[in-house]
Amino acid sequence: MASSSSKLMVKVSAPATIANLGPGYDVIGMALDKPRDIVMASLERDGRDIVEIEGLWSQDISCDPKKNSAVVAGRAVLERAGMGSLSLKMKIIKGVPPRSGLGSSGASSAAGAYSVNVLLGMPLKGEEVLQCAMEGERAACGSPHADNVAPALFGGVVFISSFNPIRIIRFEAIKDLEIVVITPEVEIGEEKTKIARQILPREVPLQDMVRQTQAFGNLLVGLMRGDPILMGKGISTDVIIEPVRAKLIPKFYEMKKCAIESGAYGFSISGAGPSVFALCPTNMGEGLGKTLKSILEGEGVRSSYSVHRNAGEGVKVVS
C-alpha cells in the first residue's frame, strides 16, 4: 500500500475522446491519440486537498478541489478504497481544450481517478475506477456520464452496456482510419455540456426511435466487423440528438454534405460540440480538414482542425 508517504508522486496522462459517435448518446465513445491531459498526484497524511493547473486553458478550469473534476474523481477513489482521511495534492497540465467537445473534463477525471488508484497500489478494478471518474464528470457538468471517461480510461472504443451496475464492452482501436476534428470558434456558454443537454427533446416519435436504433445497430455491427462503411452509416444517421445540437454549430449540414461527398465514411458532432468529426480513409484527413475549415471561413467563422487516430491506449503512467 503506497498511501502513506507524501514523497510518492505519480504522473499519468489521459486522452481526448469523442463521445456519442452519432446515435450512441451517452453510451459510447472513442479515445483519440492526441491531445492528452497530464495529472501529477501525491497523497498527504493530513491537510487539505490542493490543486494547481497549467496549460493554455488553465484559467478556464476551477481550482476549487470540490469542483475540479480530477480532484473530485481522485477523492472518490480514496473514499471507495477506505482511505478518505488522506488528502490529495494534484497538478494538472491541460492538453485537452475545455468546452470543445473533446472530453476535456473526462480526460482530467480519468487521470485523477487512475493516478490515485496507482498511488494506493491499485485496490480498485477497472469499472470501479470508472465509477469514481464519473463523479468527476458530475462535478464538471452536472451529470455523471461515462461516454468520455470510459474511453479515456480504457482506450479504443467503449460501449457502456449497463449503468446500474456499470458495465462496459471495449472494442479494439479502429485501424486504417483517420478522424478529422474541426472546431469552430463559437462560444456556447461556460456550462456548455449542461446547455447542450437542456435543449434535447424530452419525447421522441416512435419512427425516429426506430431509425435511431437502426443507426446504432449499424455502428455496433460495423465495429464488430471492422467495416468502416457500416460504422460511418451509423455515425451519420443520428435523427434525435444531432438535429437539435446542429443548430448551435455554424454550417453544420454544409460541412456534413461536403465530408460525405468527399469520401468520408461518417460525420457527426463530437460530444456536445461545437467540434464536429469525420471518420475517413487514411491520407484523406488533412485535405478534408482544410476544405471544411474553408467552409467556415466563408461564413466568417474562425476554426481549427486536427487529424487523429483512434488510440488503443487510454490512461497511462508516464515517466
Image: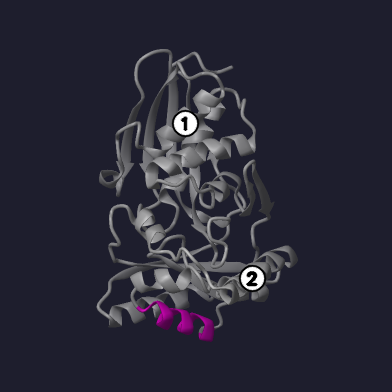
Q: Position of residue 11 (x, y in %)?
A: 47, 33
Lower position in the chain sequence, tag 1 or tag 2: 1
Q: Is residue 117 above or below residue 167?
A: above
Give the magenta part as a residue range. Answer: 251-261
Amino acid type, residue under disc 1 in the picture: Gly
Residue furthest right as drawn: 225
Quadrant, the N terminus: top right
- The residue labelled by disc 1 is 74
> Is 295 within the magenta?
no
Asked whether residue 253 is drawn in magenta, I would say yes
According to the picture, the residue beneath numbered tag 2 turns out to be 231
Q: Which residue is painted at 29% across and 66% down in the image?
A: 186
Residue name at image x 60 percent, y 35 percent: 128
Distance (Cα) linking label 1 and label 2: 35 Å
* In this rendering, position of residue 274 left or right of residue 154: left
Q: Position of residue 9 (x, y in %)?
A: 46, 25
Q: Is residue 178 visible?
A: yes
- Residue 126 drawn above or below residue 252: above
Instruction: Compare residues 159 and 304 and report the one nearer the observer.
Output: 159
